Image (spheres, rainbow, N blue to C red):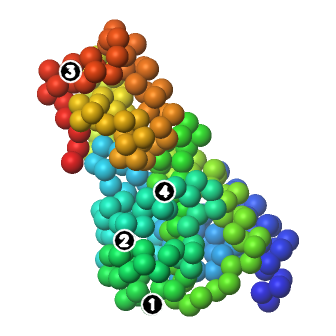
Amino acid sequence: MAAARSGADILDAAVHVRAAARSATSGAAGLDTVLAALSEVLEYDHASLSRWDPLRRRHTTLAGSYPDDATAYIETRLHHDPVFPLLNGQALGGLWLRDVPRQLLAASPGFREVLSPLGIEDGVAQCLFAADGRYVGMLNVSTRRPRRAPDPARAVVTLLTEALAAAVDRHAGPPSGESTADARHQDTRRPGGLSPRELQVLAELTAGRTNREIAERLYITPRTVGTHIEHILAKLGLPNRAAAAARAAAWGIAPAR
């Protein structure tokens, strides 16, 4: 059976995952279908797809089968876990549990308090990035017993990242329960006509952070931060980031803690 799932069958199953991701509609039902299709690529006991909310600085589960305490950890604490910087740096291929250094697992509240009590011994977590570099969410997959993932399955998780990221990003609605119309109205009243993301970057400038430090805090790339800063300076008619930071301070804008 393992041999039958280690080659062409896995790739064929991946095609079904991509199709499900592309056709996923708003609401959990569409993404539940994606996770069901993913189980044909990689057997699991628990899985979830979650969206990153940059304004609330937390994840929101869109579809998943983890117990409530594990879901709560993914949503509110995972991005503070010592493992997350390593996970966030795995742009391709995801981070497999068996590949995490033992000393890092020992320091991880997520592993000690959530995964270990569930009997989780294997799995993969994959950060999802939109085509423009935004961090949009993540895929988590866990199994209660070690399962040697065939090389095609590892490769397929990498290949599916773009489709999964697009599916998660399509489920991003206006923040904090606003309607789309309310969100558009808010856009016209934002200082300097800046976008929500540009305001976040501007706030980070008041703390004197570098592009790399801002990128790590907002889960985007340093290059994307640089682009946002260029747009901020152009929109506000300012010469440099120091002037932008001074303008933000005058407006009372400060970074989230």
Q: Residue 85 occupies which quadrant of the picture?
A: bottom left
Q: Residue at x 27, y 17 (%)?
A: 243
Q: Indicate the amino acid at tag 4.
A: Asn
Per the model, the C-alpha gap separating discs 2 and 4 is 18 Å
The tag earlier along the polypeptide, 1 or 3, is 1
Helix, strand or loop under label 3:
helix
- From the image, tell me which residue sits under label 4: 88
Q: Is residue 233 left or right of residue 226?
A: left
Q: Indicate the amino acid at tag 2.
A: Thr
Helix, strand or loop under label 2:
helix
Mark 2, Cα crowd under 10 Å, few <14 / some 14-19 / many 20+, is: many
Mark 1, Cα crowd under 10 Å, few <14 / some 14-19 / many 20+, is: few
Q: Is residue 106 visible?
A: yes
Per the model, the C-alpha gap separating discs 2 and 3 is 40 Å
- From the image, tell me which residue sits under label 2: 71
Against 168, residue 185 (above or below) is: above
The tag earlier along the polypeptide, 2 or 4, is 2
Helix, strand or loop under label 4:
helix
- From the image, tell me which residue sits under label 1: 119
